[in-house]
Amino acid sequence: MNVRELAKLAGVSPATVSLVLNDRKGVSQAVRDRVRTVIDANKYQRPAWANKQYNIQTVVFIRYSQHGMLVEENASIIAAMIEGIEAECIERGMHLGQFGCNNANLSQIIEKLQNIKFEGLILLGTEMSPEVCKAFLALGLPTVVIDNAMHRLAVDTVVMANERIAQQAVEYLYELGHREIGYLQCNVEVSNFKEREKGFLEALQLKGLSLKPEHHFLLTPTLSGVSEEMSEALEGHTQMPTAFFADNDTIALGAMKAIVEAGWKIPADISVIGVDDIVYAGMGNPPLTTMRIPRQFMAYCTVTRLLERMNKPKTVPVHLEVDAEFVKRESVIALPKPRHK
């Protein structure tokens, strides 16, 4: 039994369990009693580090946002990553501090970090450029970037296997008989989506297929933005692919709305597959087939690698890629037979 499991049983966050275990303020008496009941019922034993009142290491998490279209629009995914990182830190006897950061306050955050004591740094790289990452690396502390491969930098990273994810999506659609596969692509240039684009196009080529220009849509990665832009793009369209791959679920869901409003049926006319498995993916009409990202495992890998870096600072950087799993729902169907090839 660990802190994360106790938190799930008590219906609270791991941080709340930690506050109760350490008799700290910030928890109501009712919640404190409920957590205590769960702790006692499961005969939880505090790990050895919890009895030490000194030498507790501190890790800082930087929630960086450049424009917010990915970090804010996918808040549930980011929150799950942060909760997983927090739980892992608690399990390993470390304190986690958090800072929100953007271009406007970057210099102030850097200055603040220069004046506080901490042992490791985790950067949310979803919207982070290599230049911003360099500013944090200049602090000279053990650092791991999550959700951005930062290929050109000597830094440890934990990222989704983006190329492979896109390739798997194409292979899946191909096996179901789809030979005309379109692309719902994010128009914001970030590392994850550039890698998915590469994997998507390479997979098409390996199957002897190509992306027709009229089946390629560049879209803003917000639900409202995608829906409006897709509706405008579909005006006058009479031919559509049998399936679409979308860079993420937000784009997939917004495009699906526009496609249906334009008169096509999903999946009878057009199948759609996304990436992420956000909260709303299973609530779509129809529910969205997607690629689920194991956020808790990414958090585990991130904290584990940071600890390794803290213990052995001179080791070479490691780039970890985490694969996804299919979540098959009703937005994709098999064709009776391939149209061609």
Image (cartoon, rainbow, N blue to C red):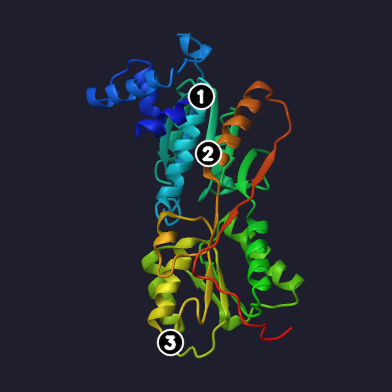
Residue 182 placement (x, y as % from top left): 58, 76
Sequence-earlier tag: 2 or 3: 2
As helix, strand or loop, the secondary structure at mark 3 comes to loop
Q: Nearer the viewer, mark 2 or mark 3?
A: 3
The residue that appears at 41% across and 79% down in the rendered structure is: 260
Sequence-earlier tag: 3 or 1: 1
Q: Nearer the viewer, residue 2 or 320?
A: 2
Q: Quadrant of residue 221 in the image?
A: bottom left
Sequence-earlier tag: 2 or 1: 1
The residue that appears at 38% across and 25% down in the rendered structure is: 17
Instruction: For marks 3 and 1, give the CA distance.
Output: 54 Å
Tag 3: residue type? Glu
Q: Quadrant of residue 27 in the image?
A: top left
Q: State whether residue 132 is above or below residue 195.
A: above
Task: Please indicate, yes or no, whether residue 40 appears anywhere in the rendered image.
Answer: yes
Classify 10 Å Cα crowding around label 2: few (below 14), some (14-19), many (20 and above).
many
Instruction: For marks 2 and 1, give the CA distance.
Output: 20 Å
The label shown at residue 123 is 2
Tag 2: residue type? Leu
Residue 296 placement (x, y as % from top left): 52, 40
Q: Nearer the viewer, residue 219 or 254?
A: 254
Q: Residue furthest left?
A: 29
Q: Nearer the viewer, residue 140 or 338?
A: 338
Q: State whether residue 196 is above or below residue 71.
A: below
Classify 10 Å Cα crowding around label 1: few (below 14), some (14-19), many (20 and above).
some
Residue labelled with disc 1 = 91
Residue labelled with disc 3 = 235
